[in-house]
Amino acid sequence: MGLLSLGTPLDWHESKKYNEHVRNNGITQLINIFKQHSNRDNDEFLWGDEVEYMLVDLDRQHHSAKLAIDKDYVLNDLNDETKSLLKARKYNVSFHPEYGRYMLEGTPLRPYNGEKLEDYIYVEENMIKRRKLSSEELPSNVKPLTLTSFPRMGCPNFTSPQANPIGPASQSLFLPDEIINRHARFPTLTANIRKRKGHKVAINLPIYPDKNTKLLDDSIPHNRHLFKSDKEPFLGASKPGYVYMDSMGFGMGSSCLQITMQAKNIREARYLYDSLIPIAPIMLSLSAAAPIFKGYLVDQDVRWNVICGAVDDRTFIEKGEDPYRGYHLFGGLDIDGNKDLNINKHGVNEYGDLNDLYTKDGKPIQHIPKSRYGSVDNYLGDGEYDTKYFKEEYSDLNAPINKKVYDRLLNENSGLFDKYLATHFAHLFIRDPLVIFGERIHQDNKLSNDHFENIQSTNWQTIRFKPPALYEQTAANSEIDFTDKPGWRVEFRPMEIQITDFENAAYSTFMSLLSKAILRFKPNFYVPLSKVDLDMDLAHHLDSAIKEKFWFKSLDSWELDYHDFIGYDFSWFDRFLSEGNDTLSSKGAVYLNGYNSSSSLAGLNGEANIGGSQPYSMNGGTNGGMNGSMNGSMNGSIAKPTKGCTGKILEEINDVDDNGLDQRYTLNELINGGDGKFLGLIRIVIKFIATELIPPDCQHCQDVKCASNLVRLKYYLMLISQRASGEIPTAAHWIRNRVLNNPLYQHDSKVSDEINFQLINDIDRLTNLQDRDLVMDFFGETIGEYILGGNK
Ligand code: ADP
Ligand code: MG
Ligand code: MG
Ligand code: MG
């Protein structure tokens, strides 16, 4: 979330008059950005993370854990020079507002340097300082926890202090408006989504089926008559067998982990953006941390579709749905004239426009398949980069575009935008602005980005292409000094927030190193976007990290020569750290993938669990106790690496696309690779570390600091590796299991106040690495011992 504009946010019915104005000027601003920055080059690879915290009032005496909605002064203090801002600056941390009044977002004050080994480790130190500093500002009972979803959000009395769900902004039956950030932007955003849509958002999550579960959300009040919308659940908004949620807060009030990276120039940024698109569902699955919503265990593991639904401002006609009885097909749109409102009479043209239907300002009304929060709809193309892998058929979603914007970008500005860039932005600009500030309607398009950012920043896709800002040019032909001014950036947004700083650092570092490695080795990861969307669905499934297979570019079509990566597995770290032992003596030597059992190094590989021990839900060990329905769907073949990329095996599992270029893989295969030609993502990262990141004066790491940094990197990668192989659980699995194994749990899928307290209390203890048993249970022994021993 960027800086908040000050001023008066307009109500939807007022603001919609300016929709075209914002879009027209936003595109002018975008064109000006491109004029100023298209040729910008040689920016450094800087990167930064964003961590979202929930402030939880943990009362150990009375066994309650609630979201603290009266501690938001902390955010002001942390940004106030007379209070804690100086301390924040000293720590190199910065805090930002988030949707929830109980939320804080923390980032490094200055981005990290992607060329420096030590910065990939420093990220954890920076995260620890953020948690420490925010804790110091809070009373001791209020904890800044990194929970993706608060388990009892929307249940009776889930806030501290208590607040009632009677607020006019959300009109929610479950969430009080007092959970929403006090800044007027946020309640207006909440109300405007509802007003544009013409009804409340409706999110339905399948209830996790346990032996005593009644497949019925019995928390929906039948007899409230406060708002017209109170009856929506009974008009079709709530589905039987599902947990029903009716407000933006259920999604935007959850927390995630984001990484922003700066590319050298726009060409590199486009290739990186495209390459990360198929990685998004994989990292969503590996970071899964949200198995409980509104007091119910749900039959999925992640938050993603909850947010998609929570900010879905589409009207019935845009979704292609019949309206609820007594509701308007066009929601809060101003329709032009007295059109025939029979949907079936209006075909859809190639841009997604419904024929002959316009809003009063002349914008076509469209059929829109996805919420403005969703997976990426168009590749940007790498035709101007070295790789040139992109083919038009990969962007196969036929996402609607704003044709007027498309034409302007292509025709008015020959050369600045090619058709793929034009399509990308023309798709973002199908959306209406959600909040317009009265004081900011008229802007200087040569200096301001606000209208562009208004649309850009409310298109919440898995990856965001962030152009630079506009800077003042003092004289017409003067050069702008771009030093310290952000350039072309790519933001990776799908990951769920992890419980501990160690994990958040590991996931952040893995993603930034993977991005660096992608730019260095230039693999081809393009698959059709329709497959990425299938993967996004799969990533929601229970334990998808070990139970599902994901579409990905066939492992022998990555355009990488596997010979180049021989030896760059986990054993590389140990070889490098043992002086003089990091070079391969000959082809096929003992170091080949670290597997060779005759090698004295073979044991090292066991740590990465490639072909090692069984996944957690098969071994019935410390993480066992899974109920029948979870075990029942385990497929024994899934977590095992295959014997290589032979057509035969792949045919047997029938997971190859017709063209042979895309296949379905387990995450173990994708992350850890297999033998021989079967590269995995981790090996590419390790080779990058080995060949690009070690400082020249760090030969064999006699320098103790460098050695300990490398060891820490190894454990970060091991966390990712072991979650992919199933040796250790995802946070979602672990949280679900703690509920299922709690003696108070009634096997009815409900998470009571007391279970919620115990869970949050455990999570707090785990966050602070206070409890050895919890750490071992969560991280497994290898990583657990390292963390407890190494994290002083
Ligand atoms: P948003 O919420 O719009 O994504 P934030 O400002 O909250 O933006 O976070 C942006 C992230 O980008 C932070 O982690 C920050 O450290 C990082 N960052 C800042 N400048 C750069 C840069 N030039 N290159 C890469 N990352 C940057
Ligand atoms: Mg945020
Ligand atoms: Mg932010
Ligand atoms: Mg962000």
Image (cartoon, rainbow, N blue to C red):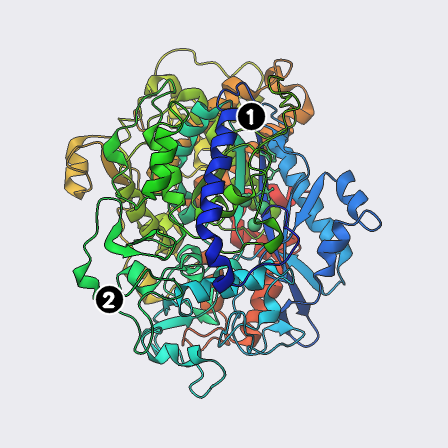
Q: Amino acid at mark 1?
A: Phe
User: SS at mark 1?
Assistant: loop
Q: Which residue is mark 2?
A: 341
Q: Is residue 233 left or right of residue 103?
A: left
Q: Residue furthest bottom?
A: 223
Q: Residue at x 37, y 26 (%)?
A: 596
Query: Which of the two residues, 231 or 700, is positioned nearer the viewer here?
Result: 231
Local SS, label 2: loop
Mark 1, mark 2: which one is toward the viewer?
2
Q: Choose top left, top right, bottom left or bottom right for residue 343.
A: bottom left
**Numbered badge on residue 45:** 1
The residue that appears at 38% across and 33% down in the rendered structure is 409
Point out the tag, 1 or 2, that comes first from the N-terminus: 1
As drawn, 205 above or below 564: below
Quadrant where the image shows the C terminus: top right
Say left or right for 775 vs 215.
right
Q: Specify the amino acid type for callout 2.
A: Leu
- 117 relative to 131 in the view: left or right: left
Is 300 in front, or is 439?
439
Residue at image coords 34%, 74% = 327
Q: Is residue 414 visible?
A: yes
Q: Is residue 523 above or below residue 350?
A: above
